[in-house]
Image (spheres, helix red, strand yellow):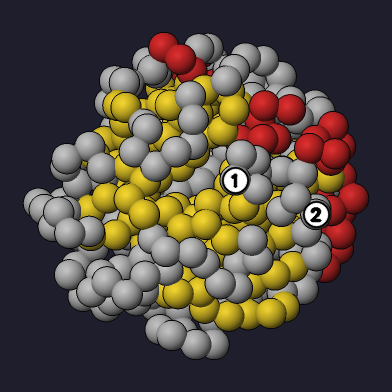
């Protein structure tokens, strides 16, 4: 059977974080992420696992990608956003990767066995890797979860202290004929016990995500009719969860993940749009037991470029530094609009503008920030996909032109980065040869203008990230 929910998108996956950095991870949060309790006070950063897709599938890559963050909000792709591992059996590709820190402090990576978007492909297996540090991946294998004529989608794992085993939950079609969340128990991720129905409310549910041991309650969030809904139980027993929350969505939304802030009692609920656009949205609550949510401002978070349905694991400062040293950070940046945070600076037909993420060709939004062509204390924006071209102003409009080597071009293509005019933690860019003018957007087109009003200041403020 197909993984599709009737009249809806295919199942896929989860896991993105939103939280403050460098604050010790609370023990309840560590348990909810399956972390080893002895290490809970040492976490200072996060690692994300994901695959990539884009609207026209130019970014489609079904290997294991990694990104890191010191705050769980702004993410830095590693290895130039290329995969760090790729399956060598089954479909030869993955979706929906999930990272778990096991009780011994090492990691296991799980993922759906599917290379691409052939939803008729059926695999009773999931991909598995072991890793001591997420810099090397060993023991690759596929783990069989059942003998049913159905998929094993969106695997996630947690430590069940009462059983002394790990539970592996995933989406599948059972004898009822609709998608349910199943569970198998394992001690080693090499063999697994018989499948059981973990959660079946009587209608299609996929993409289960657990927060374990929050004030004595366990929370399961899942996709229902393209919305995110929660259930809860005081035990981890299959069949014990009861739906309780209000639904949230932003269009067709799936792949929920629950994360507690490190700095407060706030919880974040993340979801992903089901189509190849793969835009993450987030909601927050000060009381997980209330089951009600408010949207989180997109200014506060930036997902890795083209990332889809992620898995997140807290890591130590040393692990963070080692991952950056091993894989490196991108040689390019993206610029996000302050007052339209769903839009990014790009070139289109060689005109500079801000467009809604996600789009193809996605390299149109990637820039190498080099020393200013006219003044090395400034900056010039070199196109990644047209490296002989730079963003410059001409009749005050910004466009992407070939560097002709003239002093006029160098000056037109040089800008001086300042504290953001609308937010000093962001950035603004002042023209080198028209120093009273700043890069700003107007009707989504980029130009240089004098800045006077509050709206002007917002139009001229950008976040430099990835």
Examine the image and state in which quarter residue 37 appears: top right
Q: Nearer the viewer, residue 328 or 124?
A: 124
Image coordinates for residue 138, horizontal then vertical, percent: 72, 78
Q: Say which of 397 and 184 sits in front.
A: 184
Crowd class of label 2 (few under 14; some 14 to 19; many from 20; radius 10 Å) = few
In-image side of 402 versus 320 (left or right): left
Farthest residue to the left: give it.
7
Q: Residue 233 at x, y = what percent?
A: 43, 26
In the image, 159: left or right of 243? right
Q: Residue at x 36, y 65 (%)?
A: 152
Total count of labels: 2
The reply to whether residue 144 is in sight is: yes
**Mark 2 lies on residue:** 104
Viewer-side label of 2, 1: 1
| Residue 415 picture quarter | top right
User: Where is 386 relative to 301, above or below?
Assistant: below
Q: Residue at x 84, y 32 (%)?
A: 41
Corner quadrant of residue 83: bottom right
Q: Residue at x 22, y 37 (%)?
A: 201
Q: Are the residues flagged by discs 2 and 1 in contact, CB closer than 8 Å?
A: no
Nearer to me, 191 or 268: 191
- Residue 125 numbered mark, or none: none
Q: Residue at x 27, y 50 (%)?
A: 180
Whichever of callouts 2 and 1 sits on the residue coming sooner in the sequence is: 2
**SS of the residue under disc 2:** loop
Q: Which residue is under mark 1?
A: 163
Q: Quadrant of the N terminus?
A: bottom left
Q: How far across and how far down the image is residue 236, in percent?
A: 49, 36
Seen from this angle, which residue lies furthest right?
318
């Amino acid at each position: 059977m197909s993984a599709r929910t009737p009249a809806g998108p295919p199942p896929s996956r989860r896991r993105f974080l939103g939280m403050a950095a460098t604050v010790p991870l609370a023990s309840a949060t560590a348990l909810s992420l399956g972390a080893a309790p002895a290490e809970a006070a040492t976490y200072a950063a996060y690692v994300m696992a994901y695959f990539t897709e884009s609207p026209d599938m130019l970014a489609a890559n079904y290997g294991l990608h990694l990104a890191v963050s010191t705050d769980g909000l702004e993410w830095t792709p590693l290895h130039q956003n290329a995969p760090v591992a790729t399956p060598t059996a089954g479909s030869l590709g993955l979706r929906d990767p999930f990272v778990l820190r096991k009780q011994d402090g090492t990691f296991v990576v799980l993922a759906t066995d599917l290379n691409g978007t052939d939803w008729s492909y059926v695999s009773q297996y999931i991909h598995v890797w072991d890793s001591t540090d997420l810099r090397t991946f060993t023991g690759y294998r596929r783990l069989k979860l059942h003998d049913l004529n159905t998929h094993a989608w969106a695997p996630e794992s947690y430590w069940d202290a009462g059983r002394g085993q790990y539970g592996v939950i995933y989406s599948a079609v059972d004898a009822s004929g609709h998608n349910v969340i199943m569970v198998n128990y394992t001690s080693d991720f090499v063999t697994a016990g018989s499948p059981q129905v973990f959660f079946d409310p009587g209608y299609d549910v996929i993409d289960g995500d657990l927060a374990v041991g929050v004030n004595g309650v366990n929370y399961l969030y899942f996709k229902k009719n393209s919305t995110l809904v929660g259930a809860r139980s005081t035990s981890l027993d299959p069949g014990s969860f009861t739906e309780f929350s209000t639904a949230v969505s932003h269009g067709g939304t799936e792949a929920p993940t629950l994360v507690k802030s490190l700095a407060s009692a706030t919880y974040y609920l993340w979801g992903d749009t089901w189509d190849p656009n793969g835009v993450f949205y987030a909601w927050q609550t000060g009381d997980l037991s209330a089951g009600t949510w408010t949207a989180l401002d997109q200014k506060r978070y930036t997902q890795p470029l083209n990332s889809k349905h992620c898995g997140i694991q807290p890591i130590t400062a040393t692990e963070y530094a080692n991952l950056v040293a091993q894989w490196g950070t991108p040689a390019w940046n993206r610029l996000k609009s302050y007052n339209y945070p769903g839009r990014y600076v790009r070139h289109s037909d060689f005109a500079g503008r801000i467009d809604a993420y996600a789009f193809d060709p996605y390299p149109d939004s990637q820039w190498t920030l080099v020393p200013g062509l006219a003044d090395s204390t400034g900056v010039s924006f070199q196109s990644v996909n047209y490296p002989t071209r730079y963003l410059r102003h001409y009749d005050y409009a910004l466009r992407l032109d070939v560097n002709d080597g003239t002093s006029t071009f160098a000056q037109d293509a040089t800008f001086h980065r300042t504290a953001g005019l609308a937010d000093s933690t962001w950035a603004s860019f002042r023209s080198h040869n028209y120093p009273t003018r700043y890069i700003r957007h107007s009707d989504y087109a980029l130009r240089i203008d004098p800045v006077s009003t509050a709206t002007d200041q917002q139009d001229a403020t950008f976040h430099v990230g990835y």
